[in-house]
Amino acid sequence: MRPAFLGMDIARSALFVNQQHLDITSHNIANASVDGYSRQRLSVSAAPDLYNLGGAYAGSVGEGVWAEQVQRLRNELLDKDFRRQNESLKMAETQRSYLDRLEYSLGELGDEGLQAQFESFFDAWQELSTRPEDMSLRKVLLEEAKTLTGMIREIDADTNALQKDIQTDLNSTVTRVNAISARLAALNPEIVKRAGLGDTPADLLDERDRLLDELSGYARIETQTDAYGAVQVRIDGKAIVVNNVAHEIQIQPENDILRATAPVGFPNTLNAGDLVINGVDIIGGGPALTLTGPADAGALIDRINAASTATGVRASLDPAGQLVLTGLRDGSNYVSLQLSGVGANATGLSSGDVTLTSHVRLQLRSGTYLNQTGGKLEGLIQVRNQDIPTTLSSLHQISADLIRRVNSVHENAYNLNRTSGQAFFTGTGPSSIEVSASLLADPKKLAVAATANFPPGDGSQALAIYQLRSSLQLDSRYQSLVTDLGTRIAALGQTEKRQTLLLDQLENQRQSVSGVSLDEELTNMLQYQRSFNAAARVMNALDEMLAQIVNGLGAGR
């Protein structure tokens, strides 16, 4: 037998379903401009029909419409492709951005860069060699040298400042990655709970996908969703989100060191001049240091560390008894060593110029290292740990060669006061290089003659310094550094451009699936509104029919 109020139930189901359709349409329209929002749609189906109602009611009759589930329109394959390309883009973009700044710091964007200043500096020596007594030419040379050393110090300062900026950016990026991981871990139980109740937590899933999209720019992520709806996230194969637990990433500094090639040698006696670090005579300020056995190695360490403030270097011994030098400055440290034969035998070190850099690595709190993170994190670490130290090392070698070779000639030449032994440059590297203050105060002390009793016009040693230009090739070495950097920037720019196009195409495809079209939503809204009105009219008609039956039957009795 047909239920008496079946028609009312059918009309009521249509009213409720179309009302829910309108609610979802309103929600879509309200969030049309929200980044990462996924369009929602109500999945509906016809309710099971009733049959075998008796001979008076042939066939079967439906029971209306059922609302099954709110669907969130999303394509997971497009999401994975988007995140993979986003990681590559952000890595190239980060490297290109900071290398652009590094190129600007090197000052070769115009005709007034360091390369041109090297040329002006050596040309001034050649001019002076023709008229060595000319005070105006002496002053010109000193001004050119002062400009050159100022540019070198400025490049060094700007590059080190850039390295600190990258470290600050790295700190904030790691902090943001940890915040995203914590939020993803917090979302997992909420999503699992709602999904377990048969609900579709669409807005929570949108938030999770927005976070995963952002995280993909910071690192190359791997995601896996379990049967309960919780997402697991890995970076470099290591889990950072598992269920409701987030594993925090930490920055681990690792100091670059200079290790002696042999243990401290015995017996040896170190005197003044045997061990000079960054221009500081370690033994010269005190008595000779006699090393008779392993117990005396500590005395050598103490002597070196007593001068740490001046040298910027601290010493220690490794378990094998080898001397280890560590820079004290954050970032990159310059170490210039001058050792005699005795000094080399005693310390196991060699004369030369070394740039030490404090590197950083990423690790989980458990101590597991993340070696290939991809994304912005790897871009930052690449520039901080490799590109900038390589640049600073080249600048250190160029500066140290300039100081050592020019001073070697100048100290053995004679000035207008018939004296020698005056260094032209002070300092040992790009951060400390300067023109001797006594020369700037008195240009007569500029030494360009071969002997004290020189004839007028002897500028042979000025010419000798000019000829260092071809042997040192400082300008071409610096130009090679700048050219290599420019080539790398151009390649990264091409990668960035290519990845941007790919990402735009993928985003357009994602929007075609998940994006809200206002025209489509307005069309749907009108359809649902008409359906709602029609269902209401059915309800009203049935109400009138029932009223007629009830009232008519009542009047008949």
Image: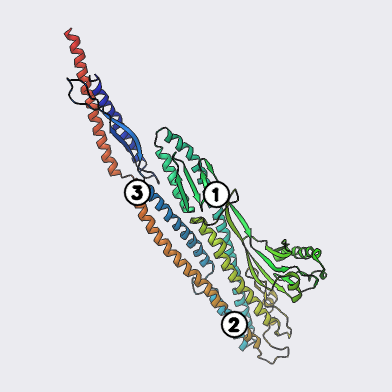
State which quadrant residue 51 falls in.
top left
The structure's colour scheme is rainbow
What residue did someone put label 3 on? Answer: 511
What residue type is disc 3 on? Gln
Q: Position of residue 26 (x, y in %)?
A: 33, 37
| Sequence-wise first label, 1 or 3 | 1
Q: Marks 1 and 3, how far apart in space?
A: 30 Å
Is mark 1 in CB contact (under 8 Å) with mark 3?
no
The amino acid type found where label 2 is placed reads Ser
The residue drawn where x is 71% and y is 83% is: 412
Q: Name the element at disc 3.
A: helix
- Counting from the top left corner in percent of width and height, residue 551 is at 20, 13
- Earlier in the chain: of badge 1 and badge 2, it is 1
Task: Measure the C-alpha gap from mark 2 to mark 3.
Answer: 62 Å
Residue 139 in which image quadrant: bottom right
Q: Secondary structure at mark 1?
A: helix
Describe the element under mark 2 as helix, strand or loop: helix
At which x and y percent is residue 533? 24, 30
Distance (Cα) linking label 1 and label 2: 50 Å
In the rendering, which numbered label is found on residue 175?
1
**Toward which corner of the image does residue 34 lie, by quadrant?**
top left
Q: Amino acid at mark 1?
A: Thr
Compared to residue 517, the image places residue 294 above or below, namely below
Judging by the rendered image, the residue that carries numbered circle 2 is: 471
